[in-house]
Amino acid sequence: MPTADNLRLHGLAIGELTDIDLTIAPGEILCLSGASGSGKSRLLRAIADLEPHDGEVWLGDRAQSAIPGHAWRRAVMLVPAESHWWAERVDEHLPDADPADLEALGFTPEVLHWPVARLSSGEKQRLALLRAVSRDPAALLLDEPTANLDDATARRVETWLVSRVRERGWPVVWVAHDRAQIARVAQRHCRIEDSRLVEEAQTAWT
Amino acid sequence: MDVIDLGWWQLAGAALLVVALAGCTAWARLGMTRSLLVAAARTVIQLALVGLVLEALFAAEALHWVALMAFAMLLIAGREVMARQKRRLLGGWAFGVGTVSMFLSSFTVAVLTLTVIIGPEPWYRPQYAIPLLGMMLGNTMTGVALALDRLTDTAWRQRGVIENRLMLGQRWQEAIGDIRREAMRSGLMPMINAMAAAGVVSLPGMMTGQILAGSPPALAVKYQILIMFTITLGTGFGTLAAVAVGSRRLFDARERLRLDRLAAPRT
């Protein structure tokens, strides 16, 4: 595993959630669940510094507030539940996509020449994951990365994501609902209950 | 000057015809007789007042009076820019951004044109300064208002795209780049269209006025070209400045998109 940094939340507070302390080790996947509206997505947005919040986040020895916003988000990359595309064609968003990754996600390299308008929501979701990963981040925040996918494709995406996380040693916060998925991918599982983060017992995934 | 003098009683003749038109609209039940008459009355009153102000200004020919008039025009234009925006920046920024960018562009270009190009004696001679500035402010106001409205409204609609680009680690300038260019373009478009159509589709008002006042058409044309260029410069630089400052204000020091800095649209 290459040298990688851990991700530490220190006294993080946004909206209803206050005083969140959490450390995610390199290569560790922490799943986050909770009722809709409990603030999962906002917590991810705070970690990515997309919304004003209190507290500090550290990536290794780099503090969020000490480096420019865009540099922080380039390192701590958030993949939202709904992706947005601005250019005409897929390859304008994915200048250096690896054909092996495309294949692992169930695409042929031709997809790069497609207009974005032709993509289905599931295809957009998978390509949005690849778009984020191909920018070489140092930590990943995933907001329901398999929400629009059928079971077989979801498994395929999971396998690809987990292998990339192990290979690169990213600390990952993964928002998920499906208990089976959480059991498959997570080393740790936290639930948001009454505006607090509760850690659930979890059999180790190795 | 060889322009034919116009008496008030001659205007009364034209006014009588407007009243006749109002009679016709009442007869046809168009429901606009009242607004037609009110608008006609406003024209008379407003223009008569401006005439008085300009007469006084021309007689005084003092720099501080010209400057005062210019600033009054600027503030009214700034207010108009603010009023024309659907989602305007809060905290006085909508007025501030519009007014400052119009001040920088219109005033600079107007002073430059007066001192270097036309060169009246003294350079602030109100007969030249006030109409020049008026035409520039009027057009710059339209450009700046269009561009700022486009900027804030598009940023609101496309907030998902902007934020997704931020999430991928882009700088704020890059994340809003397309929208910024689109806004600048929409502010510049009216002037480019006006220049392209000048003399072919429309006879510009100022040139027409000068010809009526007895200027040789060749001179009127030269003045019109100068005015079109200065208006374009004022509008162009004003629009660029307003969009540059306005788009920066949509992001905070951490380069987060801050749409909470925009007012909700009035319904």
Image (cartoon, coloured by chain):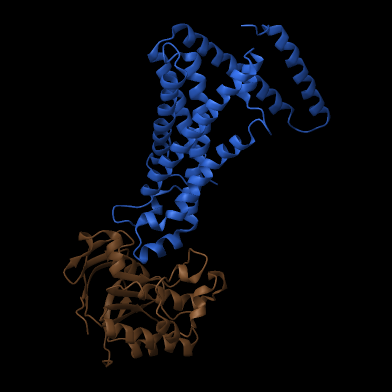
Question: Looking at the image, can residue B90 be seen?
Answer: no
From what the image shows, is residue B220 above or below residue A170? above
Colour of the chain lettered B = blue
Residue B201 image position (x, y, % from top left): 69, 34
Q: From the image, which quarter does the C terminus of chain A lie in?
A: bottom left
> Taking B234 as reference, is B42 above or below it?
above
User: For residue A77, which quarter of the picture?
Assistant: bottom left
A38 horizontally vs B228: left or right: left
Which residue is pictured at 45% across the width and 33% down the height? Answer: B78
Residue B106 falls left or right of residue A42? right
The x and y percentages for residue A47 are: 29, 68
Closer-to-camera residue (A36/A157)? A157
- In this view of the protein, which residue sits in the foreground, B82 or B184? B184
User: Quadrant of the image for the N terminus of chain A?
Assistant: bottom left
Q: Is residue B12 left or right of residue A48?
A: right
- Total labels: the figure holds 0
Quarter of the rendering containing residue A196: bottom left
Give the drawing colour for chain A.
brown
Q: Is residue A129 visible?
A: yes
Toward the right, the furthest residue is: B27
Q: Residue B170, how many percent across, how many down?
A: 35, 61
Of the pair A178 and B107, the residue shown nearer to us: B107
Residue A97 image offset from top left, x and y in percent:
41, 76
| Above or below B50: residue B162 | below
Residue at 38% across, 88% down: A159
